[in-house]
Structures are given as C-alpha cells and as structure tokens.
Amino acid sequence: MNGDLRGYDLAGANLAGANLLYANLHGADLRGANLTNVDLEGSDMGEANLSGANLTGANLSNSNLRKAKLRDVVLAHTNLIGIWMPEIDLTGAILDGTDLTDVDMIDAILDEGALDKAKLCNTTLPNGWQNERDCYYPPEEYPEDD
C-alpha cells in the first residue's frame, strides 16, 4: 500500500488481511482494531495506539513501534522479526507463537510468563540479557575420512 495514514482514527476498524506494507501509521489510533493477518512489514507505527487490537498472524517485521501503545494487544503467531521496541508497554499482551527473532525489548514492560510461548532467537530481553532459546543452528558437516 505504502499509504500515509498518519494520525488517522481507525479505532475499531476491521482491516483483516489488508496489505499495509510500508504504510505510515505514525500516531494513528488503532485501539481495538481487527488487524488479523495484516501485512505491515516496514510500516511506521511509532506512537500509534494499538491497545486492545488483534494482530493475530500479522507481519510486522522491520516495522517501527517506537513509543507505540500495546497494552492488552493480541500478537499471537505474529511476525515481529527485527523490531526495535525498547521501553514498550506490553502489559496484558498475548504473545503465544509470536516470532521475536532479533527483537530488542530492553526495558519493555511485560507480564510474568508472557514470553513463555513466544519464539526467542537473538532476542534482547527487558533485563538486557540475550536469549537464544529457540535458535536453530544446523550441525556442521565434516568430510568423511576415506
């Protein structure tokens, strides 16, 4: 789409399955919006209010979520690869099956156990520790001796 929706009031909107690649949603109000299976790759959602939104199955890889509001958001099975989201408030968020590969979550606010069912690989946790729990490194192959 690559559209400019800066500051738009999209609270409660049904945008399920929409193509919003590289969209500018900076400061948009998306409270309670249905964003299931939406492609938001590379989008700017900085300072957007996504509280209570449903982003199940969405692709947010390489998007900007800096200072976005994400309380009580559903991010189940969502692709968040490569997102930088320090100090973000994810209180009440559902992160089951969410891919947090290469995500920086330093100083983020999370409920206890919120990351138990998320995929963590090279993920910087709120305490600054790096977690590689779900990384897969294929075994090195060695030539056979003759």
Image (tube, rainbow, N blue to C red):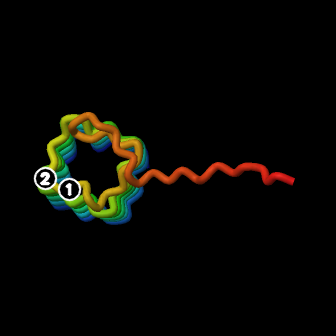
> Please, what secondary structure does the residue beneath circle 1 have?
loop
Q: Position of residue 17 (x, y in %)?
A: 37, 64
Q: Is residue 54 left or right of residue 146?
A: left
Residue contact at pointers 1 and 2, CB within 8 angstroms? yes
The amino acid type of the residue labelled 2 equals: Asp
Q: Position of residue 2 (x, y in %)?
A: 42, 44
Q: 89 above or below 114?
A: above
Q: Residue furthest right?
A: 146
Query: Percent position (x, y) of residue 134?
Result: 41, 54
Q: Residue at x 36, y 56 (%)?
A: 119
Label 1 – label 2 distance at C-alpha: 5 Å
Q: Residue at x 35, y 63 (%)?
A: 57
Dividing the picture into quarters, in which one does residue 98 lie? bottom left
Q: What residue lies at 28% left-to-right and 63% top-to-bottom?
A: 96
| Badge 2 density bin: few <14, some 14–19, many ≥20, Cα 10 Å | few
Left or right for 25, reference 109? right
Which residue is label 2 attached to?
111
Mark carried by residue 54: none
Q: Position of residue 64 (x, y in %)?
A: 32, 38
Circle 1: is it few (<14), some (14-19), or many (20+) Cα within 10 Å? some
142 in relation to 118, above or below? above
* Residue 114 badge: 1
Inspect the image, locate mark 1, and give the three-letter code of the amino acid beneath it. Ala
Q: Residue at x 39, y 47 (%)?
A: 132
Q: Is residue 95 visible?
A: yes
Up/down of 133 relative to 13, above or below: above
Quadrant containing the C terminus in the rendered view = bottom right
